[in-house]
Amino acid sequence: MARTPSNMLPLGTKAPEFELLDTVSDKILSLQQVKGEKGTVVMFICNHCPFVIHVNPEVSIIAKEYQAKGIGFVAISSNDVANYPQDAPHLMKLKASEENYSFPYLYDETQKVAKAYDAACTPDFYLFDANLKLVYRGQLDDSRPGNGIPLTGKDLKTAMDALLDGKPISEEQKPSLGCNIKWKEA
């Protein structure tokens, strides 16, 4: 498992638009359809990454809590399923059910969306404000598989709370760390 950090897209970046297959509903969904009234979390995840498996329980809890406060959540998998078949769309649908995701789990077959967001790893978290301007990118919290630090979602929750309260979000943000996105060979 490669330990790859986030690329840290510049704050203030406008969320790149997308239209992708939601493996849960089998419908094509756009950014405009999944965005929240007060903000939007875009997560790059996959089925098999140990870092994602580690954070899944906390992500599901946080999503439900903050969706009720007006924050939209969406997960995207951009991995090359030819070489990583465990990340195939039909298995994404199963994973969403197993993990009790309350958000769409989109399949980025062309990997264009991951490239537009400059995503590097799974999990990779992005928080956009109501105008879809980037206000946070980086880690969920300091917990990693095997490091003994409990999952809290502290970093992402602190940013979402500040956004909801109309307070400034610290620009000092720690990159996420996880498995590299499995890019298709050119």
Image (cartoon, grey):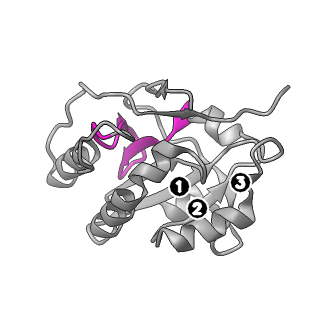
Q: Residues within 10 Å of mark 3 (few under 14, many from 20)?
A: some
Amino acid type at circle 1 is: Ala
- Residues at marks 2 and 1, CA–CA distance in whole angstroms: 5 Å
Disc 3 marks which amino acid?
A: Gln
Q: Position of residue 22 (x, y in %)?
A: 65, 65
Quarter of the figure with residue 86? bottom right
Between the C-alphas of marks 3 and 1, the distance is 16 Å
Q: Return the residue nearer the eye: 87 or 161.
A: 87
Residue 91: tell me if it is visible: yes
Query: What residue is shown at x 55% (from left), y 68% (from top)?
Result: 96
Count residues near mark 2 (Cα–Cα under 10 Å), then give few for <14, some for 14-19, many for 20+: many
Pointer 3 with pointer 1, Cβ within 8 A: no
In this view, 8 is above or below 162: above
Instruction: State the residue in front, 67 or 83.
Output: 83
Which residues make up the magenta segment? 120-143
Pointer 2 residue: 105
User: From this viewpoint, is residue 118 visible?
Assistant: no
The residue tagged 1 is 75
Labelled pair 2, 1 in contact (Cβ < 8 Å): yes
The label number, if any, that marks residue 86 in the structure image: 3
Horizontal side of 174 relative to 91 (left or right) equals left
Q: Is residue 179 magenta?
A: no
Above-or-below relation of 101 to 123: below
In reply to whether residue 122 is colored magenta, the answer given is yes
* Lower sequence index among marks 2 and 1: 1
The part of the image, by quadrant, that contains residue 148 is top left
- Element carrying mark 2: strand
Number of on-image labels = 3
**Residue count near mark 1 (Cα–Cα under 10 Å), binned few <14, some 14–19, many ≥20:** many
In this rendering, position of residue 39 left or right of residue 120:
left
Give residue 149's mark: none
